[in-house]
Image (cartoon, rainbow, N blue to C red):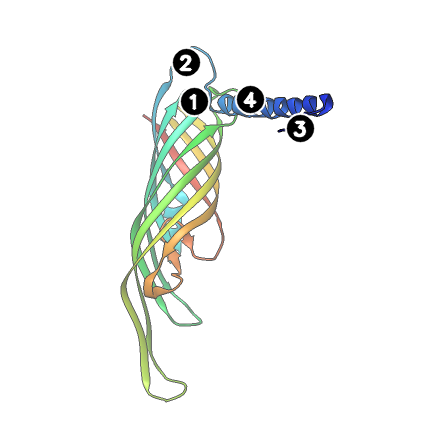
Amino acid sequence: MMPKLSISESISRRLISFLFLLMASVSIQAQMKFFSLQKDSIPLFRGFAVSFDLVGAGLMQFSDNGQYEGALRINLHDEWFPIVEIGLGKANHDDEVTQIHYSTSAPYFRIGVDRNLLKDKHAPNRLYGGLRYAFTSYKVDMSRPTFADPVWGWDTDFDIQGVSCNHHWLEAVIGVDAKIFGPLHLGWSVRYKRRLSHSEGDAGKTWYVPGYGIYGDTRLGGTFNVIVDI
């Protein structure tokens, strides 16, 4: 037989249950408010925009690694922006210390969504926050010129060709989009990258990952985009 609860215990339990229900209701309302659209006469679908990143292209021209990257973005009510980013990452690097030559060239893909964080969603300039899921599958070549074995003295070399690798990661994005004139915008973004999983076969830790950047260098990245509304 269950013991009877005192009046104070009964009231305490009911109060705790009420507080939990209230907190759950506030949490759900906050989430619904975050994902809701600003109510006005502006239509839901506001068009597309295409963009091209100048930072990666500049790296391709002036360093031993970089990428060509473009994006297609959908405008939903000037507030939510689903986006697909596709690029081609390349590296052709010689390590001055180890004398190992590293090369790769492969496409990469990102998919995600941005949200306009400004109160006035329909202003010509925007402040974004967003997330990306990214993936690349690539092959690497690694080699080292012939050198004398320090123990045995005979000539030896190091050569790995076409090792299959893949990389999955997430990116948190904060960015700005400024209207210049007509359909032309300029924008920049800062990204924090977090690796989810990877496979690099016999290559060990590959020096460069297409779309992710130099392995182990930094988790931060950035873009500077030319954007055109269509």
Q: Which mark is residue 25?
A: 4
The residue sitting at 44% across, 71% down in the picture is 97
| Helix, strand or loop status at disc 3 | loop
Residue 118 at x, y = what percent?
A: 52, 25
| Left/right of residue 107 with respect to residue 38 in the rendered view | left
Q: Disc 2 marks which residue? A: 42
Disc 4 from disc 3: Cα separation: 32 Å
Q: Is residue 194 above or below residue 1?
A: below
Disc 4 from disc 2: Cα separation: 30 Å
> Closest to the observer: 91 or 171?
171
| Helix, strand or loop status at disc 2 | loop
Q: Nearer the viewer, mark 4 or mark 1?
A: 4
Residues at marks 1 and 2 touching, judged by CB atoms closer than 8 Å: yes
> Closest to the observer: 128 or 199?
199
| Left/right of residue 72 with respect to residue 121 in the rendered view | left
Disc 3 from disc 2: Cα separation: 61 Å
Q: Which mark is residue 3?
A: 3
The residue sitting at 42% across, 56% down in the picture is 214
Q: Disc 1 marks which residue? A: 78
Q: Is residue 40 above or below residue 167?
A: above
> Closest to the observer: 31 or 144?
31
Disc 1 crowd rating (10 Å Cα; few below 14, some 14-19, many 20+) is many
Residue type of the residue flagged with mark 2: Ile
Q: Mark 3 or mark 1: which comes first in sequence? A: 3
Disc 1 from disc 2: Cα separation: 9 Å
Residue type of the residue flagged with mark 1: Asp
Residue type of the residue flagged with mark 4: Ser
Residue 49 at x, y = what percent?
A: 35, 29
Q: Which mark is residue 195?
A: none
Disc 4 from disc 1: Cα separation: 28 Å
**Which residue lies most toward the front here?**
1
